[in-house]
Image (tube, rainbow, N blue to C red):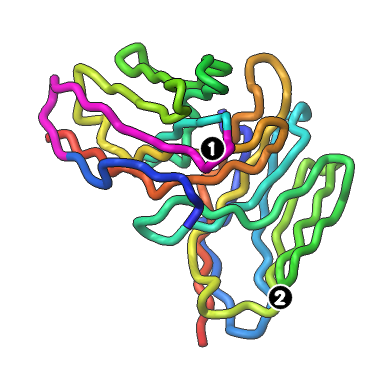
Amino acid sequence: DQQVKQNSPSLSVQEGRISILNCDYTNSMFDYFLWYKKYPAEGPTFLISISSIKDKNEDGRFTVFLNKSAKHLSLHIVPSQPGDSAVYFCAASGNYGGSQGNLIFGKGTKLSVKP
Amino acid sequence: DSGVTQTPKHLITATGQRVTLRCSPRSGDLSVYWYQQSLDQGLQFLIHYYNGEERAKGNILERFSAQQFPDLHSELNLSSLELGDSALYFCASSVQGYNEQFFGPGTRLTVL
């Protein structure tokens, strides 16, 4: 049972346009959400995060939006650049049961930004 | 560079064998997490250690074990290896109380 879902395996965007990556979750005990970027043969790199008490967090070209009622979050990249081409993972965490902050990941969305 | 180091980068071994993967966390981080990424799965949480003590277990097989040493480095031991254990194994570290985890480059394990 997938608690974090990224329903789009891939996304292709033109350079300079907006990239929107989506993520849905099912566990209402999650209280922190993160986005990671991963290049082939490298470990995931932390991008941006958001606490469940907020609905938006911005860092440069990256903005994460959280809709708790819909259990949905999205990552906006504006403007998209060819160097943004990578796999993006959504992750969630919460202090419940024996979770102790471990991350639950979606399966990733491969973003291709075309020049 | 995240500051988390993992060795070896690649490991090729045979079924039934035992291997040890090593991780050094970022300076100052007391928490170490292990994740497995296989071809058809996303990143799966295996186990979390904090300052030498086990804090949480995920879907970790009984054939797998881990420990964190006084110098805070951690080792993941995989025994009686099967073909299905072939995967990327990532270590991550974090500061206690913060959710952001920083990942190492991973160890690619191939079981033949």
Report which quarter residue B82 is drawn in.
top left
Task: Tell me the residue that label 2 is attached to.
Answer: A78
Q: In the rendered structure, are the residues bearing label 2 and label 1 in contact, judged by CB atoms less than 8 Å apart?
A: no
The crowding category of the residue bearing disc 1, from other C-alpha atoms within 10 Å (few below 14, some 14 to 19, many at least 20), is many
Q: Nearer the viewer, mark 2 or mark 1?
A: 1
Residue B32: % across, % down: 51, 31
Residue B9: % across, % down: 27, 47
Tell me what residue is drawn at x 26 percent, y 27 percent: B20
Report which quarter residue B71 is drawn in.
top left
Magenta residues (range): B12-29
Is residue B2 found inside the magenta-colored segment of the image? no
Can residue B69 be seen? Answer: yes
Is residue B22 found inside the magenta-colored segment of the image? yes
Tell me what residue is drawn at x 39 percent, y 36 percent: B23
Of residues A23 and B105, the one nearer the viewer is B105
Q: Amino acid at mark 1?
A: Ser
Tell me what residue is drawn at x 40 percent, y 55 percent: A42
Residue B62: % across, % down: 35, 12
Question: Looking at the rendering, in which quadrant would you find the C terminus of chain B?
Answer: top left
Q: Amino acid at mark 2?
A: Val
Vertical order, A1 against B26 (above or below)? above
